[in-house]
Image (spheres, grey):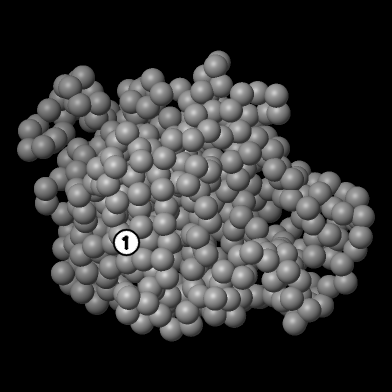
Amino acid sequence: MSLSRRTFLAMTGSIAAVGAVAPQHAASADQARRLRLTARLSRAHLLEAGQPETAVWAYDGSVPGPTLHLRQGESIEAQLINQLPQPTTIHWHGLRIDNSMDGVAGLTQPAVQPGKTYSYRFAPPDAGTFWYHPHYRTWEQLARGLYGVLIVQEASPPAVDQDLIVGFDDWRIGENGQIDEASFDSMHDISHAGRLGNILTLNGKFSQDFEVLSGQRLRLRLLNAATARVVSVRFADHAPLVIALDGQPVSRPFAPRGNTILLAPAQRADLILDCDGEPGQTSSIEVDVGRETLVAGRLVYGTQRRQRANTLSEFPVLPANPMPTDINPDDASPVDLVMTGGARAPFPSAVYQGENLSIRELVRRHKKAWAFNGVVGFPDKPLAVFANGKTAVIKMVNRTAWPHAMHFHGHHVREIQHSAREPSPHWRDTIFMRPDETVTVAFNAHNPGRWMLHCHMLGHQRGGMSTWYEVG
Ligand code: C2O
Ligand code: CU
């Protein structure tokens, strides 16, 4: 155990060093550890070797942005410096923090204007794999490269030899090697599957090799940062186990069905993967993107072997996070959320900013095509108001011809009913729904404030799939 722990520290030297000097008990804002993120224009090498660099918008100039390593409960002050030509914010996706720090422009804070700075203060209550991205023109800013991974380390992390980020993204790149900007507001994309890319990257690279040794145990932190693309990930020749989903530990590690991990936009999965291949072997990381399977990267085995201290049978179980998990669905009256619109099943009319408009007018005047309960976009009134500490139940009905990735801010939720299968027992902040499915979720509404609930296929969000709920 101590041996593999030491190996892990040695392999992540600089990160471990930063962690080592962080205050153990940072109680007040004055003692908060300071982080700084500059959102600015940059260039990234997203394409194959020999191809040009692509102009991007990025945190500290890199895609993905810097990985933030926080400790559970540690006080952080994160300063955003906006050097973009647009207003922006940072949303800390999946963190159950104070509502005023949630980073949603127009709901929890005003957008940060170009040239201005803004400070976020919070202490992450849960350990796990999270991420951060803007919440202002998100469909554009995220697609331009503004996002990064946020790791909240467990008090005693499981012993692994390498702790690796496996972040998928897709990009729509034109002939000139640059981001296709004209399609950000493409009505076709908004009303269909969203703005799908034509280039898949892993950790911002066209292809990424991970150097491993036979006998090593890896912790892999998967993220789908694409704005529309659903990915199904497979590690050829290997059989990983899932230990956490959307930042919340699963109660018992499990082998994913078909050895494949499906990630809708914004979803994460933490895996344990034992490198039981032979020295010198390479194995591909395959991504099924719908019509084809791409190789996004490889596990490349060195010529040495590593003597493993832990055995294959002892898979680590992560400790549960301090999340109120007591839910009594019988005490709550379910709130309906009926999803309509989009191509192939458009609604005749819906309400936008208080006006009842035909689909034709919505499309032509506002580039809107989707509704929740007949209301397009961001309503003045919340979908529901839940009493603090009580069970909230939301029944989501997908009456559209498209899949969606329903993301809840401020809370993780659990399926209690599913029209197509057994409800999943895992806590998630983003629920993948296929056409015609009905999924009822429940959670303990313990985090007061105004929280977004929207589709994380961001063209859909832009096109009207967006609402909010309040915890009083
Ligand atoms: Cu990942 Cu509303 O956001
Ligand atoms: Cu959607």
| Residue 394 appears anywhere in the view | no
In this rendering, position of residue 150 left or right of residue 86: right
* Residue 311, position as x, y percentages in the image: 80, 76
Residue appearing at x 53%, y 42% in the figure: 63
Position in image of residue 340 (x %, y %): 27, 38
Q: Is mark 1 within 8 Å of ligand 1?
A: no
Q: Residue at x 65, y 75 (%)?
A: 158
Residue 433 placement (x, y as % from top left): 42, 47
Mark 1, other Cα within 10 Å: few <14 / some 14–19 / many ≥20? some
Residue drawn at x 35%, y 49% is: 81
Circle 1: element type = strand
Instruction: Report the residue marked by disc 1.
Output: 120
Q: Residue at x 48, y 26 (%)?
A: 179
* 151 with respect to 32 (left or right): right
Q: Is residue 238 visible?
A: yes
208 vs 252, nearest the viewer:
208
Q: Quadrant of the N terminus?
A: bottom right
Q: Is residue 389 above or below residue 54?
A: below
Q: How many marks?
A: 1
Quarter of the figure with residue 119: bottom left
From this view, report whether residue 52 is shown above or below residue 81.
above
Q: Residue furthest left?
A: 354
For residue 108, above or below residue 83:
below
| Relative vertical location of residue 365 with respect to residue 164 in this rendering, above or below | above
Residue farthest to the top, as pictured: 175
